[in-house]
Amino acid sequence: MLKLGVNIDHVATLRQARYRGQPGGEPDPVTAALLCEAAGAHGITAHLREDRRHIIDNDVHRLRRAIRTRLNLEMANVPEMVEIALDVHPEIVCLVPERRDEISTEGGLDAAGAILALTETCLRLNNAGIEVSLFIGPEPRQVEAAAQIGAQFIELHTGNFAEHFEQTAERNREIERLVAAATLANQFGLRVNAGHGLNVRNVPLLHVVPHMVELNIGHTLVSRAIQTGLAAAVREMLDVMKGYIG
Ligand code: PXP
């Protein structure tokens, strides 16, 4: 069965828009994570960015204590984050590229261009019992590099596929690249996750991609939650306003 890892970063983005620098605040990513688990999600993903723009350190520690499924900590391969991962001890770390000017992770990791640094981090995390996944584009040389580095998983970047969903030729070409990359990864003994830009319209087209273990999905779930939950939130507010008699 294909598993669902829910990325809760955008819950934290919304909280930071109002409560940055303050304790607590809503919406709480840990509460959201527990709701996702109760609904059947198989894991929770959180990206602790170097600039702490959404998930903050305290969220990661609270998630570690609260969730009952698997914690997938997304992070850049930098010493500060490696130390945090060794301290928090998520089940899995997904190494991603990070640029400060991007809104969310845009491209895949250049694993082929950073073999030594990634191998060292992979070894340190593995020695601590933490599995490692590399977020890469569906390119054979990046899959080969992931195998050489000794990662347990790759996460295939589905952003190009999602962006070209309406352009059939480009979309189909991207699906072929995902199929080829997943096939190659499997031949190398790598397990395969995928994510970025996925939603209920485009996920069914990915059913042809073999060997996938888990999809990591965030933005669409938080978006759908707002659209399906806003009416209830308005009713709740109108209810408490009813007491006004001035
Ligand atoms: N996987 C990785 C590695 C990500 O960085 C992200 C968020 O950018 C996702 C999956 C989830 O993408 P989305 O929020 O578009 O579903």
Image (cartoon, rainbow, N blue to C red):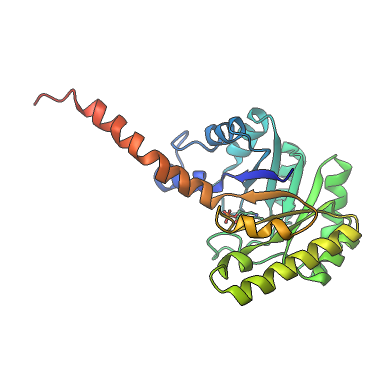
Q: Return the residue found at the far bottom.
A: 169
- The residue depicted at 74 percent of the width and 39 percent of the height is 90
- The residue depicted at 70 percent of the width and 56 percent of the height is 207
Q: Quadrant of the N terminus?
A: top right
Q: Quadrant of the C terminus?
A: top left
Report whether residue 105 is seen. yes
Relative to 24, 134 lies left or right: right
Front-lying residue, 116 or 139: 139
Determine which quarter of the picture holds residue 35: top right
Q: Is residue 241 above or below residue 156?
A: above
Which quadrant contains ligand 1? bottom right
Report whether residue 53 is seen. no
Q: Return the residue found at the far left.
A: 246
Q: Is residue 211 above or below residue 24?
A: below
Q: Residue 96: percent from the left, percent from the top?
A: 69, 58
Q: Is residue 46 above or below residue 69?
A: below
Q: Is residue 189 above or below residue 114?
A: above
Determine which quarter of the picture holds residue 136: bottom right
Q: Residue 121: percent from the left, percent from the top?
A: 82, 53
Q: Residue 26: percent from the left, percent from the top?
A: 44, 36
Front-lying residue, 123 or 84: 123
In this rendering, the count of numbered labels is 0
Front-lying residue, 33 or 37: 37
Relative to 221, 124 lies left or right: right
